Image: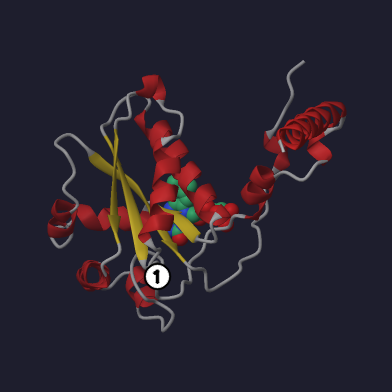
Amino acid sequence: MKKFLIISAFTAFAATGCDAQQTAGNDPTQEKNQVIETIMARRSIRAYKPQPVPHDVLDKILECGINAPNGMNAQQWEVRVVDSKEWLDNATAAYKKTVAGTPAEKAAADPSFVNMFRNAPTVVFIAHKPGPCTQVDCGLMAGNMVLAAHSLGIGSVCMMGPLGFFSTPEGKPYLESLQLSEGYDLLLCIGMGYADEQPAAKPRNRDVIKYIK
Ligand SMILES: Cc1cc2nc3c(=O)[nH]c(=O)nc-3n(C[C@H](O)[C@H](O)[C@H](O)COP(=O)(O)O)c2cc1C
C-alpha cells in the first residue's frame, strides 16, 4: 500500500511537471483560456428572469469585486446590494414621477420595462470616497464583478444612468436607505440576474491600439 502511494504521488508529480513544460513550450494565445473566453463572451444584459441572484453566488461575485487592484490598497469604496422587489418597484415608481414629460417616461411605459435598473432583479451599488484613484478603483471592481458574474452564469449590466434619480427629492429616501458612510458618493450600479436575452457583441474599434516603437 505504502509503495502504491509513493508511486501514485510520483506519477502525479511527473505528470504535472510534464504539463508545465509542455505549456511553457506552446503558444499560450492558442490554448483554451477560461479567463479570455469569459471576457470575450460577456455582454450587457437588459432583460432578466425574475428571480434574484442567490446570495452564495453573489458572495463570490462581490469577493471578486473587492479583490480588484486599487490605488495603494486604500479600498475607498463601499458596496450595497439590493434585491428586495419591493424596494426596486417602489424606487421605480418614484423614478417614473421624476421623468414625467421626458423621453425616459416613454421608455418606462414600454411593456418590456420592469424596473429602472434595466429590469435587473438584483442591483449592486458601488460608492467611492472621491480621491485621485477611486473612480478607477471602482471601475476595476465593477470589471471584476461582471466577469465573475458571467463566469458563474449570471448576466449583468453596469449603469450610471439611474444614478441621477438619487439626487432628486424623490430619490433621497432610497439613497439614504443605502446607508453609505459619510463622504461616500454613489458612482455606478450593476444590475445582475439570470439573462433572458443573448445580445450580440457590439463592435469594437481596434484602431485605438497602437504599439509605439
Ligand atoms: C461606466 C458605464 C456606465 C454605463 N451606463 C449604462 C446605463 O446607464 N444604461 C445602460 O443600459 N448601459 C450602461 N452601460 C453599459 C454600456 O452601454 C455597454 O457596456 C456598452 O454598450 C458595451 O456593450 P457590452 O457591455 O455588451 O460589451 C454602462 C457601462 C459602463 C462601463
Q: Crowding at label 1, few (<14), some or many (≥20) Cα neighbours within 10 Å? A: many
- Indicate whether 100 appears above or below 64: below
Q: Nearer the viewer, residue 7 or 72?
A: 7
- Indicate whether 54 appears above or below 167: below
Q: In the image, what residue type sits under mark 1? A: Asn
Q: Nearer the viewer, residue 100 or 79?
A: 79
Badge 1 element: loop
What percent of the width, then of the height, locates residue 13? 75, 29
The quadrant of the rendering that contains the N terminus is top right
The quadrant of the rendering that contains the C terminus is top right
What residue sits right under mark 1 in the picture?
Answer: 119
Look at 81% across and 29% down and name the residue there. Answer: 14
Q: Is residue 67 left or right of residue 10?
A: left
What percent of the width, then of the height, locates residue 130? 27, 31
What percent of the width, then of the height, locates residue 206? 72, 41
Q: Is residue 143 left or right of residue 106?
A: right
- Indicate whether 122 appears above or below 178: below
Q: Residue furthest bottom?
A: 111
Q: Residue furthest top?
A: 213
Look at 48% across and 67% down and name the residue there. Answer: 46
What percent of the width, then of the height, locates residue 32? 77, 45
